[in-house]
Image (cartoon, grey):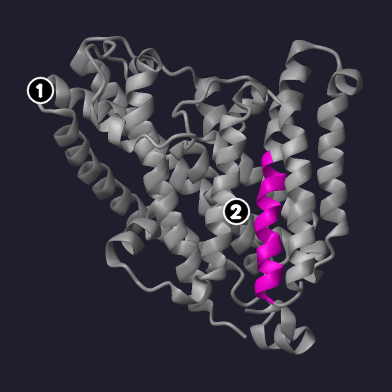
Amino acid sequence: MQQATDRALFANQLRGLAIIAVIIVHWCGIYWFARDTVASYIHAPVVEGPSSSMINWLTIPTFNYGPFGVSVFFLISGFVIPFSLNRLAPGQFLVARFLRIYPTYIVGSLIMLGLVYLSSRYWGQPFSMPLDRLLANLMLIQGNVQQPTIDLVNWTLSIEIKFYIIAALMYRSIKTGNAYPIFLFAAAALGMSEASAALFGGTQVSMALIESLKTELMCVIFMFIGTGFYHHYTGTYTTRQTANYIGILMILFLLCWPHTVWLEQIPSVPQNYVYGFVVFTISYLLRGYFRPIAPLDFIANISYSIYVLHSIIGYLSIRILMDQGLSFPISGLLTLLFVLGLAYLLHRFMEVPTMHLGKRLFAKKAVPAAALAAANPKTLP
């Protein structure tokens, strides 16, 4: 029986690696290569001049930091969420997860919008945020109701919420290790993707909803790959069963891709999900060798708050600092310190209290660990 610290350190340090990859792609890639988009979101003039030379030595052939980081995040969620489901009833689990996601995201988004407003004043440009767009984003349903994102990154959180709901619905399957309902879900998602026009043809609004759900459910299939590692970790699956489980879901996941709005991303983005899977697998197999690394552990511990804050705030901070005459590397370093400071405060005063609130609400109602171990010793780490 393995220790919880083994699981926590292995997953947590991967989480730190993933957020570093995401920051690199946004600040060193999107900032330069999507200048019009960045300018519109921070209410600033389009940045002019050549891109930073840093991009040259950060570039790795066929490797994209963004999809790689996101894929690792998804696999980590698939791996760790069953531990929560194993000790909470489905309804309790959903309340706890919503408390984990929404308060921090809402407060972080309001901080971001406040800084965007200040950016608009700095650049002398008008600022507006329609209420329907704001509410859709704060509820994390923006993609499903045809509202533009407010931060360019919350689409992954929308997928996380879908995963929590589907995982709660498959509570018994996940708890017992019965893979067939998950396979049926993945096959149904693939079938919907292939036949969506015939099955759901109609208004533009309804088709937009279906298109967004097709992409989100495809990613949920990928997240369930992480759940296979959970079952191997707890001893529910043998190595061969785990390999078969992962192989089936990976095939269904990749078959869904050509039927989504991400079609044009083939092959560059799917192959980076494969890279993420390879790194996750190797790290899982070598999890006993992971040791504390203070800077990485700190970043990992506040990674959710960093993710919520880093995108738009990073763009506007770098843009203003460069306007003040600082170089891109110095602007990036100062922005990193600024974002880390904000993220720590958000983590300390919002993320941790609401996370603990979710735990306290059901502390007495959750099934005791000893009882679970007695009932099925293979389901606990």
Measured from the top left, where is residue 98 in percent x and y? 58, 51
Picture quarter with the C terminus: bottom right
Q: Which residues are magenta?
A: 219-234
Residue occupying the point 60% across, 53% down: 75
- Marking on residue 324: 1
First in sequence, mark 2 or 1: give its number: 2
Question: In the picture, residue 373 is in which quadrant?
Answer: bottom right
Residue 128 vs 52, above or below: the answer is above
Residue occupying the point 21% across, 45% down: 337
Picture quarter with the N terminus: bottom right
Mark 2 residue crowding within 10 angstroms, few (<14) / some (14–19) / many (20+) = many
- Give the residue type at disc 2: Leu
Is 150 contained in the magenta span? no
Residue occupying the point 75% across, 11% down: 204
- Marking on residue 75: 2
Measured from the top left, where is residue 6 in percent x and y? 50, 76
* C-alpha gap between disc 2 and disc 1: 41 Å
Q: Is residue 307 left or right of residue 98?
A: left
Measured from the top left, where is residue 58 in percent x and y? 32, 37
Q: Is residue 156 left or right of residue 374?
A: left
Q: Nearer the viewer, residue 209 or 286?
A: 286
Mark 1 residue crowding within 10 angstroms, few (<14) / some (14–19) / many (20+) = few
Residue occupying the point 62% across, 32% down: 141
Which residue is outermost to the front?
Answer: 61
Q: Secondary structure at mark 1?
A: loop
- Give the residue type at disc 1: Gln
